[in-house]
Amino acid sequence: MNKKMKIALTVCAALILLLVIVNILIALGNQSIQNEVAERQQEIAQTIQLEALNRQLITVLANMALKTNDDRLKKLLAETGISLDAAPETAPAEK
């Protein structure tokens, strides 16, 4: 092998090493983003579960306020944006 070929191979090896390092850094960045997305998905799933529970709780409170004619409870529900003018919705049946 002549000197020019050795230099060319060394340059290629250095370039390949640089590309491997860049690839590792990109993979680490992707892993970080994937972990963040997984955390957000978990939060969304928990929020959906809590939404059903919140609806059931509001329905029970609205029914109780109407049955007992509790003005304080009616006021509390009204302050949170829940109107008792119409009949309260019943919770949907679980599948």
Image (tube, helix red, strand yellow):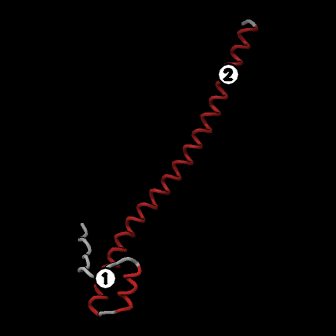
Give whichever of discs 2 and 1 has the lower sequence position. Answer: 2
Q: Residue at x 53, y 53 (%)?
A: 36
Residue 29 falls left or right of residue 84: right
Q: Secondary structure at mark 1?
A: helix
Judge by depth and name the residue closer to the eye, 62 or 13.
62
* Coordinates of residue 23 in the picture (x, y in percent): 60, 34
Q: Nearer the viewer, residue 29 or 84?
A: 84
Question: Which residue matches tag 2?
Answer: 13
Q: Could you say which quadrant of the image residue 22 lies in?
A: top right
Q: Residue at x 24, y 76 (%)?
A: 90
Q: Quadrant of residue 9?
A: top right
Which one is in front, 17 or 43? 43
Q: Does 39 sit above or below residue 93?
A: above
Q: Quadrant of the N terminus?
A: top right
Q: CA distance from mark 2 to mark 1?
A: 71 Å
User: Residue 19: percent from the left, percent from the top?
Assistant: 63, 29
6 displayed left or right of 83 = right
Outermost residue toward the top?
2
Location of residue 6 in the rendering, given as x and y in whole percent from the top left corner: 73, 12
Find residue 21 and name its label.
none
Q: Residue at x 67, y 29 (%)?
A: 18
Q: Amino acid at mark 1?
A: Val
Q: Quadrant of the C terminus?
A: bottom left
Q: Up-down: is 12 above or below 60?
A: above
Cβ–Cβ under 8 Å for marks 2 and 1: no
Numbered badge on residue 60: 1
Secondary element at image label 2: helix
Left or right for 1, reference 41: right
Q: Amino acid at mark 2?
A: Ala
Q: Residue at x 54, y 48 (%)?
A: 33
Residue found at the very far right of the displayed protein: 3
Q: Residues within 10 Å of mark 2 (few under 14, many from 20)?
A: few
